[in-house]
Image (cartoon, grey):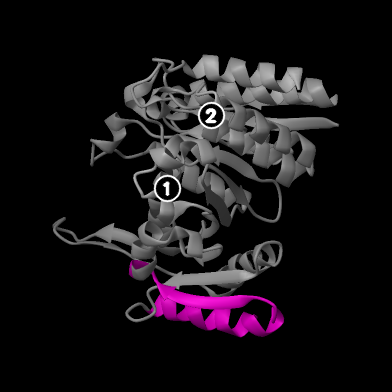
Amino acid sequence: MKLEIALLAGDGIGPEVINEAVKVSNAIAQKFFHEITWKPALTGAAAIDSVGDPYPESTHNICLTSDAVLFGAIGLPRFDNDPSAKIRPEEGLLRMRKKLGLYANVRPTFTFPSLIDKSPLKRERIEGTDLVFLRELTGGIYFGKKGRSNDGNIAYDTCTYSRDEITRLARKGFELAMTRSKRLCCVDKANVMESSRLWRETVQNLEKEYPEIEVSYELVDAVAMRLVQWPNTYDVLITENLFGDILTDEASVISGSMGLMPSASIGNGNALYEPIHGSYPQATGKNIANPIATILSAAMMFEMSFNLFDEGKLIRSAVNTSLNKEIVTEDLSNGKKSFKTSEVGDFLVREILNS
């Protein structure tokens, strides 16, 4: 199969972890006789520095004409620490999601048997955890009306949702739940927020179309507590943009490191695959960043965009072997010998080609 993949390395450790995902993907292509054409493009701070735009039209066109997008990370402290900055790297990511119609972020959280005791949570609380968040990506407070008063002393951000935006995300959640254990949790703040009441009402109206699905409704603060108490009681969770942003980062530590969890952003066209971690600028250029989340994102890409399930399975098998053999970066070494970012990638390539 011929695959054309847009490659957006981004900022910070993005280029380093993307490089390892490319190596692993190329090994998969060699093993299964695929032909990958990589189409590099600028985004984030790198694009601002180069062309003054965090998501230039040239990058958008490359994404539009590719079969899938593999993305690294975005953001740098010099923008975070400058409240007066007129343009920010993260604007590129938001605009990319909007222009590509990527309205649903799929974020799995699961545990690795060999790392179960490296989680900050007790073994008995997290064993068997295998949940998926679907976070709405193109609406809510991040895209609502915002501004400052004339004197600069009052600021506002408006959370706005339409029934259509909620319906399309919820349907994805119901469809995903049908392929799993047929349980769906709608996460909201319907006791105080009107937008959340619309979420709950809309999902309730959809229930009759999916009679096999057991649906529950929980307030976001209750879910935040249960995620660290009994995360293995959840299966599929759907929620709005801001709540999903926070809860998925909370859930990511269950596995033991933010460097382990992949994600996909999907819509009605092509899809984008990225690790859930940020740009980690402190590690930039040191060859110490964990590439596994990006590599597992590539596995999701093979499966979700190309229906190449054996390829995705082989990547995950190689990752499990590396974890079992403790071929890991310093975030997982627990004071023992650690391996460089590139060394982990090299190990996975050998595992794939020798399997």
Q: Nearer the viewer, mark 1 or mark 2?
A: 2
The stretch drawn in magenta includes residue 212: yes
User: What is the secondary structure assignment of the residue under circle 2?
Assistant: helix
Q: Is residue 10 above or below residue 228?
A: above
Q: Which mark is residue 254?
A: 1
The percent coordinates of residue 88 (x first, y second) are 37, 38
Does residue 162 appear anywhere in the picture?
A: yes
Tell me which segment is drawn in magenta. 194-221
For the question of whether residue 70 can be seen, the reply is: no
As for residue 138 lying within the magenta part, the answer is no
Q: Secondary structure at mark 1?
A: helix
Residue that label 2 marks: 323
Closer to the chain start, of discs 1 and 2, is 1
Quadrant occupied by the C terminus: top right
Closest to the observer: 347 or 8? 347
- Distance (Cα) linking label 1 and label 2: 16 Å
- Dots 1, 2 in contact, CB < 8 A: no
Q: Position of residue 175 (x, y in %)?
A: 69, 66
Taking the image as shown, residue 94 lies to the left or right of residue 334, namely: right
Main secondary structure found in the magenta portion = helix
What type is the residue that disc 2 sits on? Leu
Q: Is residue 10 above or below residue 88?
A: above
Mark 2 crowd level (few <14, some 14–19, many ≥20, 10 Å Cα): many
Q: Quadrant of residue 25?
A: top right
- The image position of residue 317, as x and y in percent, is 67, 33
